[in-house]
């Protein structure tokens, strides 16, 4: 089952499918979309995100953006997916409404895998059915209705993510700082490499950020910035035809040798060695 709302005037796209692997090529666009992937099966499903194997257990969701490379080749069971582009619903413009950036989307931490608890499964199942029902009513306000339902899905998922993925030792204001830091790093990692750059944007001291992240996880803010830069370098090597020098300049390195030293420090391999390893493993 594949359903799509498409407004060619705005370029807005929202899609729903209960088998993204089969339906991926049948939407107007998937390359520039954000996706909720939901395992509604009774068994786990394996997929790849940036070439890392990800196992989704039953009643788990994960969110991915157009920055990530997702492969469903290893998925043996159908995955339900909601997908939308920024023309349909721009989460940056609506961040004050849903507070999801840096937690569900465009964060620097591990992939946000959310488990739908037993007591909320009926709520999520009902919301899915309401989405399906809305697609059967193609009137002038269908797009607005689907936006409203999508916003509800984002809010419900964000609440679960905060409860399951963020330590209880942090209060809401502290979570907001971490969330915004993650989002800002995803926006500016090519040009801003120092913790003080982000502290200034957040009107906080570098020490405040370091203290918060020592509670949040084992990574320092500086490590998060460098990890994001290294991740993008690996993506560009793996999924594009760009040469090392091009990648170095794209990521803000003035000297390819500096980029090579950075990459080896982060991965224990030079960019060329990493590229050769990929060729051997494929």
Image (cartoon, rainbow, N blue to C red):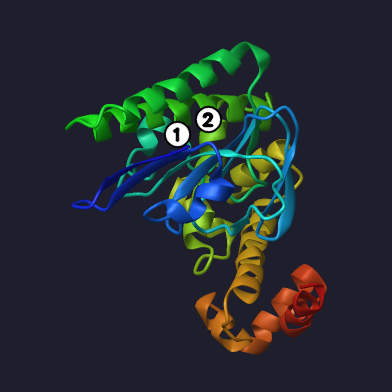
Q: Is 122 located above or below residue 21 in the figure? A: above
Tag 1, which secondary structure? loop
Tag 2, which secondary structure? helix
What residue is disc 1 on?
99
Q: Is residue 8 left or right of residue 164?
A: left
Q: Earlier in the sequence, mark 2 or mark 1?
A: 1
Q: CA distance from mark 2 to mark 1?
A: 8 Å
Front position among marks 2 and 1? 2
Q: Position of residue 148 (x, y in %)?
A: 33, 27
Identify which residue, 161 or 36, lies in the foreground.
Answer: 36
Q: Is residue 124 left or right of residue 45?
A: left
Q: Would residue 106 be seen by someone viewing this image from the given angle?
A: no
Identify which residue, 199 or 157, lies in the foreground.
Answer: 157
Where, by quadrant of the figure, is residue 48 drawn? Answer: bottom right
Q: Position of residue 36 (x, y in %)?
A: 53, 39
What residue is disc 2 on?
158
Query: Badge 1, how many Cα within 10 Å: few under 14, some, many 20+?
Result: some
Where, by quadrant of the figure, is residue 159 drawn? Answer: top right
The residue lying at 17 percent from left, 32 percent from top is 140
**Number of numbered discs visible in the structure rendering:** 2
Query: Badge 2, how many Cα within 10 Å: few under 14, some, many 20+?
Result: many
Q: Are marks 2 and 1 in contact (CB under 8 Å)?
A: yes
In the picture, the disc for residue 152 is none
The residue lying at 33 percent from left, 47 percent from top is 13
The residue lying at 56 percent from left, 32 percent from top is 174
């Amino acid at each position: 089952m594949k359903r799509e709302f498409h407004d060619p005037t705005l370029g807005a796209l929202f899609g729903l499918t209960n088998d993204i692997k089969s339906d991926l090529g049948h939407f107007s666009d998937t390359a520039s979309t954000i996706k909720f992937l939901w395992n509604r099966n009774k068994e786990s499903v394996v997929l790849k995100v940036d070439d890392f194997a990800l196992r989704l257990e039953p009643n788990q969701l994960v969110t991915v953006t157009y920055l990530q490379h997702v492969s469903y080749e290893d998925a043996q069971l159908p995955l339900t997916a909601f997908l939308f582009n920024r023309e349909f619903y721009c989460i940056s413009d609506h961040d004050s409404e849903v507070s999801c950036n840096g937690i569900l989307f465009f964060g620097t931490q591990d992939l946000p895998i959310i488990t739908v608890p037993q007591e909320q499964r009926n709520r999520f199942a009902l919301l899915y059915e309401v989405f399906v029902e809305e697609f059967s009513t193609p009137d002038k306000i269908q797009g607005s209705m689907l936006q409203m339902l999508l916003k509800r899905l984002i809010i419900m998922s964000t609440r679960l993510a905060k409860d399951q993925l963020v330590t209880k030792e942090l209060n809401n204001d502290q979570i907001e700082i971490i969330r915004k830091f993650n989002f800002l790093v995803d926006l500016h990692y090519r040009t801003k490499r120092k913790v003080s750059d982000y502290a200034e944007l957040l009107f906080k001291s570098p020490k405040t950020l370091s203290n918060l992240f020592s509670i949040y996880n084992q990574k320092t803010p500086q490590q998060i910035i460098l990890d994001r830069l290294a991740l993008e370098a690996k993506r560009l090597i793996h999924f594009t035809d760009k040469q090392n020098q091009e990648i170095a300049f794209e990521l803000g390195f003035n000297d390819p040798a500096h980029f090579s030293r950075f990459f080896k420090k982060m991965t224990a391999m030079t960019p060329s060695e990493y590229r050769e390893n990929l060729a051997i493993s494929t």
